[in-house]
Amino acid sequence: MTELTFTHDEVAGRTVLAVAGEIDTQTTDELRGKVDELDVSHRTLVLDLHAVEFVDSSGLGALLGIKKQQDRGGGTLLLTRLSDAVARIIEITKMDRVFEVV
Amino acid sequence: MRSTWTSSEVGRDLAAVDWASTTLGDPDGWPVSLKAAVRILLSSKFAMWMAWGPELTFFCNDSYRRDTLGDKYPWALGRPAPEVWSEIWDDIGPRVRTVVETGEATWDESLQLLLERSGFVEETYHTFSYSPLADDDGRIEGMLCVVSEVTEETISTRHMTTLRDLGARTTGRHSEAEAIAAACEQIDADPLSLPFGIVYLLDPAGRELVRACAAGVDGDHPMAPETIALDDPAPVWPAAAALAGRQVLVDLADLPHAPPPGPWHQPPAQALVVPLVGAASSEPYGFLVAGLSPFRPVDDVYTGFVDLFAGQLSAAINAARTFDGEKRRAETLARLDQAKTDFFTNVSHEFRTPLTLLLGPASDALNDPGLAPDDVQRRRFDVIHRNGQRLLELVNSLLDFSRLEAGGITSQFEVVDLERVTEPLVMMFESAAEQAGLSLEFDTEPFSSDCYVDVEHWAKIVLNLMSNAFKFTFDGGISVTLREDDGHAVLVVRDTGSGIAADELPHLFERFHRGRNQASRTHEGSGIGLALVAELSRLHGGEASATSAEGVGTEMTVRVPLGRAHLPSAEVTDSAEPRTAGAAAPTALVSEARRWLAPEADAPAPAGPLDDHVARVLVVDDNLDMRGYVADLLRQRYAVTTASDGIDALEQMHQGAVPDLVVTDVMMPRLDGFGLLKRMQADSRTTSVPVIMVSARAGEEGTVEGLEAGAADYLVKPFAARELLARVGVNLELDRVRRIRATLERSEALLDQAQHLAKVGSWEVDLEGRTVTGSDELLRLIGRSRAEFEAMDFPDVIAGVVHPDDADRVTHALASLTVGGLASFDQRIVRPDGTEKLVTVRASLQGDESGAPRTLQGSMQDITEQRAAEQALAEARAREEAAQREHSIAEQLQRSLLPAETFEIEHLDVATYYRAGVEGTYVGGDWYDIIHLDGRRTAMVMGDVMGRGVRAASVMGQLRSAVRAFATLDLPPHEVMQHLDVLVQDLAGDQIVTCVYAVHDPAAETVRYANAGHLPPLVAARDGAVRRLTAGGPPLGAGYGDVPTEEVDLPAGATIVFYTDGLVEHRGHDIDEGILALERHIDWHGGSSLVGVPESIVDALLPQGPDDDVAILIARAVATDDEVTMSMHRDTGRATVAEARQFVQSSLQQWHVPEVVMRDLALITSELVTNAMVHGGAPVDLRLQRSGARVLLEVLDDAAGIMPRPQDPDDDDEHGRGLRIVETLSDEWGMRTTDQGKCVWSARTWASAGRTES
């Protein structure tokens, strides 16, 4: 049983959500749910991914979904502190041109 | 003034309002009362707002702003209140006006207000009071509102009420339909929380979802279809996800239809689909679609409520289903029980009619004075009558039993002198016991009070117990006691029989239970007797019990209460005197017991044909009548003996009475038919005696079992006399023919000789008178009449009889005889008809008194046929010997040439094939070998010595040994070839030998090889690309030279094939065509087994069969360094994908696979397993293999149809990257269909130490 853990914080007008755990097809709902709950699609959401030990294409899809949701809501999605796992899949899938990493 | 406002945030914002532009003007000019009111407002921690002046200008404090105002702040400050609360002014305007106009305060509790304060209209509840505010003159100029928001309390109370009501309505024994109806009514009752609700349940066949109820939505609404097919590609609701156990929040705007309106002026925008999960399994069996209020945020509180609602509903459905199931089971059992009882009753009744009709005439016949006492028909009728009686008894017990079961048996209890009634019943067995050499005792004491029994039932109890004791007792005896104990009459029947195993005791009184492995007098029995005893005892308010010790004996006890208090008074007959006479006792049990006794009770055999030529048949059966019947049938033709069971039969046979055939029953005590057969087969004296088994076990199964055990034949009861006779006859005849043939073969040679001996003629020559005489046999032999023969003179007779070519030799032989001397020679004679005969002539020369030659006499024997036969025999023998010799040499060589052991090579799948081209004796020149080397390596050898026969084979044998020796030295392949080259030059001279020697190294995943003139081995990669290994030198014996060793990759899944010319060389065809055909005809797919592959290649390439030797060796590198598998079931709520990754990672860690490979494979695993789960079905199997520096991951699912392929998603596509990732990270990947579905695999290699060598 894997579960994601979240910590969120408001820093300089931005919502920073730190995610820890493994993001796959069985945890994406959790991540999406958490982001929905924050309800910050009109604002800037920063996902801190340094504690994400694993992410696969489903997880990547979820990140993309969140990005689209932010775009629609007039907000922004920023990724920060990518773990190796996240960095590698973004590189493999050439999604570095899609995500904004700070 | 303004300085006092700045203590709070609102105060600061109030100060910023441009008051001059409002009706109130600059705050400095405000009346004192207003200033005071504003100060009170700002300093209060209670949420408040106030309105002042003609426009009801709006003020509020921090608390109000936080709880209620939301986004309207700070815009609302200083604005007219009707404008600030325009959306609810209809509700609150009248209240405000009333307060201002009348000066009376208002109080509203939990007033529902749809506020728009967070960017959407929200259902809220507030409790508030309006109080008037007066200006400095006491005139009412405004109002103060003190507000407390009670939204959460109100809504949670509503939720709780709904849940509580649902719980209350569904608790208890309700049906599934009732539970669902209650849920729907509850949804209807709380439309504010649940604007609509639909329940879908899987139909029993699991093919579609059926709407169980719908609330708040019309039955024909497109969002509430009556059924949803599981294979619907675009269902209204996400059925697949829900059935996979996931909650789904559905955006109703995405659906093509307008949602049901709900109780609000605005329809619901979202619905939550919640799975309904069974109690026993985690598989959902349906789901609830809950419409969500458009005026409440979809947060944990809301979804939690829907969750609880669905949970309560599924709990109710589960309870109802469990209850239903149990009820159905109970009903089914009761029905079954009834059906069984009915069946017994009916069947028993049905049996009685024909039995009566059978017994009547049989009895009449027996009583017919016209039937002589010794008439054979009388015995037949007797058998019919006795067995009919027995069957009737069984049927009666069965009927009693089913009557008991159905409660239909009536008892007549009366006062009985139990001792006087019981004793005769026991003593009925006296004579049988005497006959069996058993003691029988009956002991009783008087009772202190009256004993009520049903005499008929009691008789059955006693007789069944007695019969049972008698059945199992061989030595010692039976003792019966009848005593009073603790207000009960206690009947104990104690025997010294074989006893009952402890684990059988508890079942003893169950119906149809029959003891196993007990020594008994018979195997007959219905298993009803003791159950009936128990039932009848219970009918008397008593009980039956048993204790036993195996080998010691058994004690059966029946306890019946004294007196009548425990008996239903309607069944008790009052009588003054105790009854002393028993019922008309069923005597069948007693007569049956007598029949069990010893085989000497067999009817004496009537005089039958008993001379030596008559076949002897032994009939073995434990049932006396059956035994008698079969024996009588066979006695008409055979000498019949009988035995009562397997042991008896064996004893008889051991005493020397070995029959020609045995007919045996299968089910017998002590030793059954199969046991007898087995013991007979183990004994040389009886092993050839055919055995016919007779059994009541019908059906193919029994027959096959019997024949497999070695029975000559198998007969199923009931059988016709004719059939038995036919089978016995046929089997005896078969056996006789076999024996006669053997005897004939033995005596044939003797007969031949005797015939030849008879063809001897004798002759005599009177040398003085030159006359000749001969015996009749001689005349017959030479084909002349006496006159013709005697007309010939000596020595002219030689020319007249002897073959011209032999004449000189004969003349010489006779002439060289001295007196008293003997000569013996073979010669040919020519008969007048021109035919020739070969004869042996013995001659002696007799002298007269003076010793001068006087007579020449001798014999002439026809040896034409004998010689011809001898010659033929000698030739045949020579041929046979030669063949035998060649064959044994060939065999010997074959054994030494081809690997003796079966191939168990860790890293190779190997299949080999060898077939000699010419049928029979010749050993060809092909050979192959497989040799284990150090370091898990394997050497493979394929060679061909040109030419055939023993010589070629012996060269081969020596080469094979040499290769093995060189391999053991671990010489590199080309050096092995150089040594072999020298050896062949020494050994074989001009013989040409080709050979290929290859070493497979699993760590390096290579094959290193050297080829001396042999056909090129083929290497096939996993993808099917075939390559010929053409490198090599000249054949052995021709100077192999310095051709170096070659190396080729053989990764896991790749295949290498060695073969000889017989496979590819074909008369009239180019050898290259043959090799091309071979390349085409191999199934190269790495996954399939090699079993049968060589054979199929030969079939394909040589449809007419090989004309030359063919040898094939196929080896496939397999990944068996390490292999682990994992099987996953799509189990909701469990993190299976994570488990799969974890499994892969921990396995790879154990195998010391590099970190980076491990990480990539974890990702590949995640992708493939996710795909398998989403597109395939459970279970998903995962297999991980390592061979050397290569890991193969296979994910198998059971969805055959869909073959995934990598996609090229746009940058904003959320899906479709999985296989691209797999493709990027794998060295090789692919998919194939499997028996169950498909397998997607990915392989990954890395640089390892093993690869740097060579």
Image: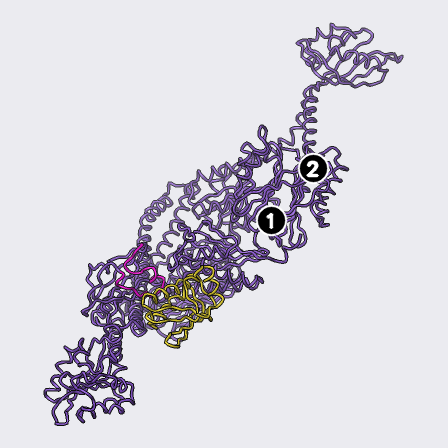
Above or below for B813 versus B246: above
Specify the quadrant that holds the N terminus of chain B: bottom left
Q: Secondary structure at mark 1?
A: strand
The answer to whether the residues at label 2 and label 1 have Cβ atoms under 8 Å apart is no
Rendering colour (chain B): purple
B398 over B956 or under it: above or below: below
**Image mark for residue B1035:** 2
Q: Is residue B1200 left or right of residue B781?
A: left
| Chain identifier for the yellow-coloured part of the image | A
Left or right of B515: which side holds B934?
Answer: right
Residue positioned most to the right: B850
Picture layout, residue B1239 above or below residue B1152: above
Give the chain letter at badge 2. Answer: B
Q: Is residue B512 magenta?
A: no
| The quadrant where residue B323 appears | bottom left
Say which quarter of the image contains residue B1129.
bottom left
Kind of residue indicated by mark 1: Asp
Is residue B235 shown in magenta? yes
Give the mark toward the camera: 2 or 1: 1
Q: Is residue A29 left or right of residue B1187?
A: left
Q: Position of residue B46 (x, y in %)?
A: 25, 88
Q: Are marks 2 and 1 on the same chain?
A: yes
In the rendered image of this protein, does residue B725 appear above or below residue B804? below
Front-most of residues B231 and B179 = B231
Tell me the residue that label 1 is attached to. B1049
